[in-house]
Image (spheres, grey):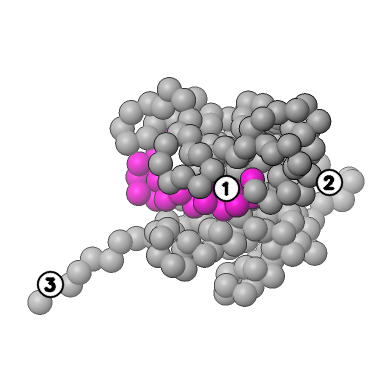
Amino acid sequence: MTKTKTAQRLPLVVLISGEGTNLQAILDACASGALSAEVCTVISNRADAPGLRRAIAAGVPIHTIQATAQTARTDYDTALRILIERHNPQLILLAGFMRILSDAFVRHYRGRLLNIHPALLPKYRGLHTHRRVLAAGEHEHGCSVHFVTEELDGGPVIAQAKVAVRPDDTEAALRARVQRQEHRLYPRVVGWFAAGRLLLKNQTVWLDGAPLTRPKMFAEGSDSE
C-alpha cells in the first residue's frame, strides 16, 4: 500500500513588538489550513508585548531579546539571528516589529524577510501613517506587504489593499479598517511564498514565474485584483 505524501508546511518565525494582531491572522490561517505554514517561534523585543500571549495560547514557543540604550544594533541583530537560526525558518515575518534591522541582517535574509506596512507604499513610510493620511486629506489609504531591504519601508512591494478614507474618519476608525485588510493580505502573500509562487530576484518581485510590473492590488472587501 502506497503512503500519501504529506505536503511540507512552510516554517515561519514571526517578530513582534506589540499587540500581534497580524501574528494572530497568521496563526489563524495556519490553524485553519488556509495557509500551509507553521509558526515555529515568535520573538519580541519587548517582554510585555501583548502579542506574546497570542503565541502562548496557540502553543507556539516565545522568546524575548531586549535591548538597552547601550546595546549596539549589530550586537542585537547577531543575537536575533542566532535565535532565529535555531528554528531553521524558510521565511521571517515582521509583524509590527519596532526595531530598525542592520544592513547585514537584512542582507543575510534577503528574499526571505517580509514586512507589512500600514500605508500604500511608497507613500507614508515610517510611523503614524493613519494620522498623516488624515492630515493630508487623502481619499484612499491601505496597507502593503513588501520584501525587506536595507532601505526602511523601501523594499519591493508585493501586494496592497486599499480602503476609502471617509469624511468622518477618526484615526482609530481608519486604523481599524486598514487592520482588517492587513489581516487578509498578509496570510495571502505568505501563502504565495509557501506555494513556491513568490520570490525576489535582485530587486524585482516575481509571482507565478513572471516579474511584477506593479504590486497586486486588492480593493476593500474584494478577493480579486
Q: Look at the numbered disc 1 and give the secondary structure of its residue.
A: helix
Which residue corresponds to mark 1? 181
Query: Do the CB atoms of the residues marked 1 and 3 lie less than 8 Å apart?
Result: no
Distance of label 2 from label 1 (alpha carbons): 35 Å
Which residue corresponds to mark 3? 2
Q: Nearer the viewer, mark 2 or mark 1?
A: 1
In-front residue for pair 56/86: 56
Q: Residues within 10 Å of mark 3 (few under 14, many from 20)?
A: few
Q: How many marks?
A: 3
Instruction: Say the numbered circle drawn on residue 71.
Output: 2
**In the image, is residue 104 part of the stretch drawn in magenta?**
no
Image quadrant where one finds the C terminus? top left
Residue at point 37%, 35% (across, down): 207
Q: Amino acid at mark 2?
A: Thr
Q: Nearer the viewer, mark 3 or mark 2?
A: 3
Q: Position of residue 210 (x, y in %)?
A: 33, 28
Residue at point 57%, 48% (across, down): 181
**First to last magenta residue range:** 178-202
Residue at point 20%, 69% (across, down): 4
Q: Look at the numbered disc 3 and give the secondary structure of its residue.
A: loop
